[in-house]
Each structure stands twice: as structure tokens, then as C-alpha cells.
Amino acid sequence: MRNETRVAFNGFTKQIALLNSISAASEKFTVTPSVQQKLETAIQESSSFLRLINVIGVDEKDGESILLGVGGTVAGRTNTTATARSPRDVSSLNSDTYSCKKTDFDTAIPYALLDSWAKFPDFQTRLSGAIIERQALDRIMIGWNGTSAAATTDRVANPLLQDVNIGWLQKYRTKAPARVMSSGKVAGKVTIGPTGDYKTLDGLVYDAIQLLDPWHRKRPDLVVIVDRNLLHSKFLANIEKAADNENELAAARIIANGTLGGLKIVDAPFFIDGAVMVTTLSNLSIYFQTGARRRMTKDEPERDRIADYQSSNEDYVIEDFGLGALIENIQEAA
């Protein structure tokens, strides 16, 4: 790296050391709880989707989901001359458990890129932002695509980080299979069209709502998270009315303002192909263990790069399984 880059990078590592009350950031250290919370807030704020869900610090590595889910109704009346009133436990019977697993977020940045940033006064912000943004995107990718937590992950075999942790959809498949539909009249697929399981995508979403607990089915904050490709036939005519160079903008506007089965559409990054999920965004959580983030930032001249090694213990949690449903393997009828 160039000399001015060296000065800027040394300032970056000295700031990390100062914030965490350590002698040098080039040695592995535990991020202080206050700095960890600031990092977590920055990661969440870097993604519009993460800002809509819960990102929560927990003290224990394992435990029960912590947000209060009301597992049923509480209103009623008791003839107290005959019996005492009995308050209903509002903690949901459909709540998830969590087990925070160590996840490495190791980032390498080549000297050439650092040299191009060194002339800017916000060098430290740019470098921090690049590291934070990738962690945010990876968390979303794992949340939708994660199916296992391998001891050693394989990025080539699992390009969508399927083996890094168990995500929200896999939690439904294993812990609430009655709320998952993956087959219709034809095994292994749910079809849409004149001869399919459902005539329209709207009809499929209406039916998916029935998989929720009765007291959740008319909640005003229900949304439908949907694979964008499934919207193609429903909104194709409207999108094609726009000029070619406006198609993408038209698609984004239609999705932002559109509904399916009466529910607002959410276009979530990295959501799986051929699927829809009905839930509330507040039903999706990422838990991280406080005091368990480790970090080391150092120069690696043998690779012409700097490296930022970080790890965090975390898990993907469904707060109330009765507040969601997943329909997958959706295809157009032949």
C-alpha cells in the first residue's frame, strides 16, 4: 500500500484499539459490549430489510425466544361468585428456541482498493462501511437460505450460504411442518394456472393465510414475502406498458405498492425461488450473543491486502410459528 494509505489504515486500527481499550487491533480481542451494540446497530441500519425485523442481543447462548408472543386471546369474563379469575399466560405456545452458533465474518480488502480510498477524508467510514454492508447482506442470505450449520462450510457447494446456519424457512420446515405446503396434486410442486392447484397467485396467498392461527389471520401487519419471479405473470402487462429503460423502475414501483391476497408485498433480498411466506416482519428475528463478538484487524503484506477477522454467535429465530406460513415449490401449471 502507498504511504498515505498506511497512515490512514494505521489510524483506523488505532481507533479500533482505542474504542475497545486494547493495545493493538492486530491481536484477537473481545469487542466491548458497547462497541458491539454500535456495530450491530450499524449492520442493521445498513440494510432496509434488516431495519424491518428484530436484531436482538441475548446474554445466554441457548434459550427460548424472548419477544412476547400472544398465543391466543385473553379477553373474557368470570363469575367470581363461583370461581376465581384465572389470568391467561400470554407467552406463545408456538415460540421458537435459539442456539447461537459461532459465525465467522472475515473480510479481505486488497491494497489497490485501499489506495483508491486513501485520498478521501472519510477513509475510516468507507472501510467500516464495506465490512458492515457485507455482514448485513450475508445475514439476510442465511436467514432465507440456511438449512444447516456445518463444522466447516463449503462456499462452492453452498453459494447462498446454505450451510452456515439454520434460517427462518428451515425452522418452519423442521419445527412447524403443518404450516408449510410444498406439494399439491402433483408431488413436489404447487401449481398455479387454469389446471393447477390454484387459479391465481392471489388465491394461493388467501389459502396460505388459513395456515396461521385463527387469531392472527386478520392482523393488520401481515405481509407476503414473495419470490419476484412469481410476480412476473401477474404484473407483466403493467410492467410492459413502460418504456424498456423504465421496466425495472416500473417493476419496483408495482411491487412496492402491490398486494397479493389482500396483503402488502415485501420484496426481500435473497428470498428463495418459487416460494411465498405469509407472516409479520416483527415475527422474524436474529439473535446475537452479547459479549461474544471477537475481532482482529491486521495487515497481510504477503497477500497484498488487509484482513478483518470477526466472529459472532448468532441464530435465526421465529418468535411465533402460529404467525406464519410457507408455500414453496410453486410453479405454473402445464
Image (cartoon, rainbow, N blue to C red):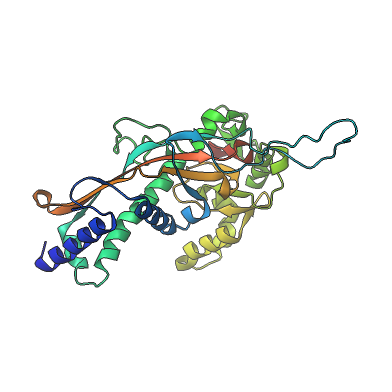
Q: Is residue 109 left or right of residue 282?
A: left
Residue 202 appears anywhere in the view: yes
Question: Horizontally, is 306 left or right of 327 in the view?
Answer: left
Count of numbered labels shown in the rendering: 0
Q: Where residue 243 appears, x then y in whole percent? A: 50, 68
- Direction top: furthest residue: 187
Relative to 44, 117 lies left or right? left
Whole-percent x, y for residue 51 in the image = 49, 56
Vertical placement of residue 253 versus 53, above or below: below
User: What x and y, as percent, mark residue 139?
Assistant: 40, 46
In what quadrant of the picture does the N terminus appear? Answer: bottom left
Residue closest to the eye, 181 or 31: 31
Q: Nearer the viewer, residue 14 or 265?
A: 14
Place residue 147 in its image quadrant: top left
Where residue 39 sits, quadrant-wise, is bottom left
280 is higher (above) or lower (below) than 329:
below
Residue for point 18% across, 50% down: 26
Quarter where residue 158 is shown: top left
Please tell me which residue is depicted at 33% across the width and 45% down the height of the picture: 293
**In the image, residue 264 above or below residue 118:** above
Percent across and percent down for residue 77 are: 85, 39
Q: Quadrant of the C terminus?
A: top right
Res. 98 in view:
no
Task: Using residue 101 as the reference point, say whether residue 55 is left or right of it.
Answer: right
Q: Of residues 37 and 148, which is closer to you in this image?
A: 37
